[in-house]
Every structure is written in structure tokens, then in C-alpha cells.
Image: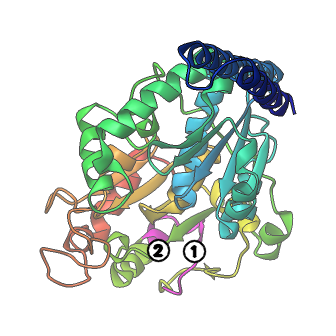
Amino acid sequence: MLMKSYFNEFWESVLRLQKRYDVYSLTFLIKLLWKTLRLIVSVELERLEKALSKLSTRRVKRREIRVLFRLTEGIGGILINLNYLLNFKQKICKDVDLDVAVDSDKFCKVATCLRGHDFVSGLLTWKEAKRNENKYALSVELARIPYLREWDPFILCRHLSLSSWVKQTENFNRKYPEYFPSGAVGDGLLTERTLIQGQNRLSQGNVIFFMDEIQDAFRIHVAKQQNVHELYGLCDDGYIVVVNSEKVKTRNYPVELFSHLVMNLKKEFPLYTLVQLGDEDRQIKGVDIYLQGKTDFEEFLSLVSKAKLLIAPECGAVHVRHFAGAKPSVVLFGSTLPEMYGYKENINIRSSICRGCEWACTNWDEYCMISKTDRALCLNSISPKVILDKIKSRDWL
């Protein structure tokens, strides 16, 4: 309305000039130019005043700043990224509200893993986050490393450490576009960079070294599912869990070799019950209790975390057990590298037949470039005896 009044006033003054001066005279043109300049200055001053007023209303308290992280990995990758976000919250923005968005299929699992934690203010599905994205001062996609989606510099400028992180991350995103999106090119190059920098998957999110160190601090608060333990007569540390249901074919240990290992375990350690868990139907002969595909995530989490030992290829179950208490596991590496995905409490076994093929080609997850089939030669060359000898050498059982 004020701008409209400016124009009305300007037009009335022009009409008065027309009555007083010849419209073709120099005097008229000079006065018209002067009034035009006054109009422009008045309008621009009003716009500036409105902008400053709007800016002042956005002087929010730090606690009201909201940041959204959109997590896109599987459950293992999500747990690693939650550990990164715990460090992010503690070291960069303690006084900022941090929300996390995940795929709806993983929502309940992630909610279970976050139980008892307060570093995440809200958990949403991707659809919910998309509907409310305008309320966030910063929106970040986190697969392996952070990728900035949207941010509001007017709000972030009031938080020095967060705005500094955004600036450095933005520069990295622009300088290395080949790392985004994830896939054969991005993840492959990023793995090489991570190892060269002396990092691993746990610290990979800190690729720009903004934080001095990523602490292995996140732990799942496990609620024991008494019913599933009682149903099968299992007591803590009285059973061994085996998992061989990884959907990536080049990360699965051959069933026949696993069956041979199970038989040897039962001979060497007869007091322990062998329980098979997982999602895919790949039954291992000789297990005492076959629960593959028969447990919900709460039961799976309880069984994996309370077991005396976990034996599995590198998969989500290994990461779940690590973040649920870091009890030891025997992890069989195929296409992936223990230097990248291994944990120090585990026995990490891999063959020297190749250096690992993760993201070496687009179909690395279903095709072995050495055997020319879907049978990973690296895993096929790990004998059950080698695994058993490694277990016996630790006096865990």
C-alpha cells in the first residue's frame, strides 16, 4: 500500500508540473527526472526497510534452528551414519535441533536403534521430510559423506561452527562432483580416497576433517526379548549366531562351506547352541535352531547382541552387533575390504586371492571377475578349518 501511495504522489506531482511548465522545456525534464529519482529512492528504501524488518524477525534462538539429515543407506550404513551424527551434534551444534529422515521400510528399525537417545530430535520418513523441508535451516543427504541439499544462510550465519561446516562442505561438494551420486563411480572413488586419507567407513563422513576425530560412541540400547530366548531355551552367552543372508552375492559365504564349519563347531564346542538368523532363505545344514526370516527386528537385535559369538560375512548383522555392544564376531570378507569395514573387536578374515572388487564395476555385487560367475572366488577360498583355527586361537568359547 505504501508503494502505491508513492506512485500516486508521483503521478500527481507530474500533473502539476504539466500545468506549470511546457512539457518540452528543459526545466520540465529536469524536474521530472528529479521526481523520478526521488520515487526510485523512496521505493528502494522501503524495500530495504522491509527486508531488514523481515531479517530481524528471523533472529531465532539457536535452539530453534532445525537441521535435517536424510539417510539413504541400508541398516548397517545408517548405524554408521548415526554414529557420525552423534559426533556432529556433540562437536558442531549441541544447541541445534537435529532431525533424521529414513525410508519408510527402515523407519521402525531406526526408531528401535534410537530408543533412549536424545541427540536426534525427530525421526521422519522421506515423504514426511519432503512435506516439511521448508522449516529447516539446513537439509543434508548423507549416504557415505554429507551432500548439501538446501540451506538458509540468514539463519545459519548466527551459528558460527555450523555455518563454517556448511561452507567447507559446500566447497567440497562443488570441487568433487564425481563423488555424487553414490554408485560405481562415486562410491568407488570415495573408498580409495578414504583409505588414502587413513580413514575407514566409520570415519568416512568426516571426509573434510572438520572434526578432529570421529569417536565410536553410538550404542543401541537393547531391550532383551525374553519370550524369544525362553521359547528356544537360550541363555546369554550360551549360543552362537550364524548369518548368511546377504543379498549381495559376492558377500555370501558358500552354504556348503558354512555347513562344514557348523559341524566342526559342534564337535569342538558341544555346549553351545547354533542359531541361524537373517532374511534370505539360505539354510545351513547342522544348525540347532533355524530362525532365518522368522524374527522381527527387536528379536533379531536381542539375539544377535546377546550371543557369545556371531559368524557372518560382512553384512548388516555385523554392524548391528558392533553398535549393540561391540561383542566379538568372526567376519568373512569377500568383495569388501576389512580395512574399510572391519571393527577392531572382531576376527576379520579375507582371502589374499584378490584385493576386493567393491564398485570395481557396476555388477560387482553379483559377478566375480576372476571366476566369471556369481560365486566369489575370494570367499570360496576361505576354508572352514582356517575359520575354526582363528576362533580357537582367541579362547572366546
Seen at 40% across and 54% down, the residue is 391
Residue 326 seen by the camera: no
- Badge 1 local density, few (<14 within 10 Å), some, or many (20+)? many
Q: Residue 228, located in which quarter of the rendered image? A: bottom right
Is 376 or 96 nearer to us in this picture? 96
The answer to whether residue 213 is above or below residue 244 is above
Seen at 20% across and 75% down, the residue is 368
Is 338 or 369 nearer to us in this picture? 369
Q: Do the residues labelled 2 and 1 touch (CB within 8 Å)?
A: yes
The answer to whether residue 165 is above or below residue 207 is above
Kind of residue indicated by mark 2:
Asn
In the rendered image, residue 127, in percent from the top left (x then y), is placed at 71, 64
In the rendered image, residue 159, in percent from the top left (x then y), is placed at 65, 18
Is 348 or 102 nearer to us in this picture? 102
Identify the image quadrant of the N terminus: top right
Left/right placement of residue 79 relative to residue 3 reads: left
In the rendered image, residue 2, in percent from the top left (x then y), is placed at 85, 28
Q: What element carries label 2?
A: loop
Q: Name the residue under label 2.
A: 244
- Residue 293 lies in the magenta stretch: no
The residue stretch that appears in magenta: 265-282
Q: Residue 271, located in which quarter of the rendered image? A: bottom right
Seen at 51% across and 53% down, the residue is 77
Left/right placement of residue 175 relative to residue 138 reads: left
Residue 235 seen by the camera: yes
Kind of residue indicated by mark 1:
Gly
Q: Residue 305, located in which quarter of the rendered image? A: bottom right
Is 9 or 194 nearer to us in this picture? 9
Distance from Cα at disc 2 to Cα at disc 1 = 7 Å
Q: Mark 1 points at which residue?
A: 278
